[in-house]
Image (cartoon, rainbow, N blue to C red):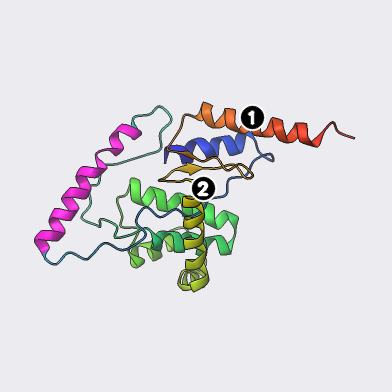
Amino acid sequence: MNADVRLRRLEREYAGRIELVWRAFLLRPRPRPAPESREETARALEKFRAYTRSWEHVGADEDAGEFRVWQTDAGPPSHSIPAHLVAKAAARVGREAFAKMHARLLHAYFVENRDTSDRDTLHALWREEGLPEPAFDAHRDPAILRDVLREHDEAVAFGATGVPAVRLDGNAAVIVGAQPEALYRRWIERSLARLDAAAGPPA
């Protein structure tokens, strides 16, 4: 969330010069086994709630996104793929639809504490954003799943070990973790300066 806030602000600042392209990285590529009892379900949820207390630290940053320690009885999310499939289905509708769904997924997870691996929850989020109903079914397209897995593998090959991970097109370096906005800005400025130098003076 914090990197999302900072990078979107920089995209607006450098409008026309940079463009954010979000790609898949799977923190949980495979579904975790379903609990075998109510007691096991409760233990898993309490363990997840304890984990989300770490969000209070990142949420304390001055320019942080919005976070809430998990308070609902939903989840925890079983794996990462469903949300990525739905985000890419939105991308087929258009860039604006993807941006809306991307932001909605983050808010649903980090603020509303909704299970973003649950298909009914994802469908509800789609409807809440007013996206065209028939386009939701694209998340079942095997081609979208292949795209998600390919992008994940590419990120791993570039050196991504978690999220957020940021890479500039044409630069193999990957910055992992939410970094201060000043660091992202320096990286962008240096890259733009190299591109300008390579292009030479205007004719």
Please indicate whether residue 160 sits to the left or right of residue 16 in the image.
Answer: left
**Quadrant housing the N terminus:** top left
Q: Does the magenta portion include 54?
A: yes
Spatial CA distance of label 2 from label 1 is 22 Å
- SS of the residue under disc 2: helix
Classify 10 Å Cα crowding around label 1: few (below 14), some (14-19), many (20 and above).
few
The residue labelled by disc 1 is 189
Residue shown at the point (44%, 53%) measured from the top left: 25
Q: Is residue 121 visible?
A: yes
- SS of the residue under disc 1: helix
Q: Give the total number of marks visible in the rendering.
A: 2
Q: Label for residue 32?
A: none
Instruction: Examine the image and state in which quarter residue 56 appears.
Output: top left
- Classified by dominant secondary structure, the portion drawn in magenta counts as helix
Residue shown at the point (59%, 55%) measured from the top left: 95
Which residues fall within the magenta stretch?
Answer: 38-58
The residue labelled by disc 2 is 158
Q: Which is nearer the eye, 9 or 168?
A: 168
Q: Look at the picture and state if 93 lies above or below 54.
A: below
Q: Look at the picture and state if 2 lies above or below 105.
A: above
Q: Which is nearer the eye, 195 or 131?
A: 195
Residue 78: image location, x then y, percent: 29, 60
Circle 2: residue type: Phe
Q: Does the magenta portion include 143?
A: no
Q: Look at the picture and state if 52 lies above or below 40.
A: above
Residue 63: image location, x then y, percent: 43, 30
Residue shown at the point (26%, 43%) measured from the top left: 52
Circle 1: residue type: Glu
Please indicate whether residue 179 sits to the left or right of residue 49 in the image.
Answer: right
Q: Nearer the viewer, mark 2 or mark 1?
A: 2
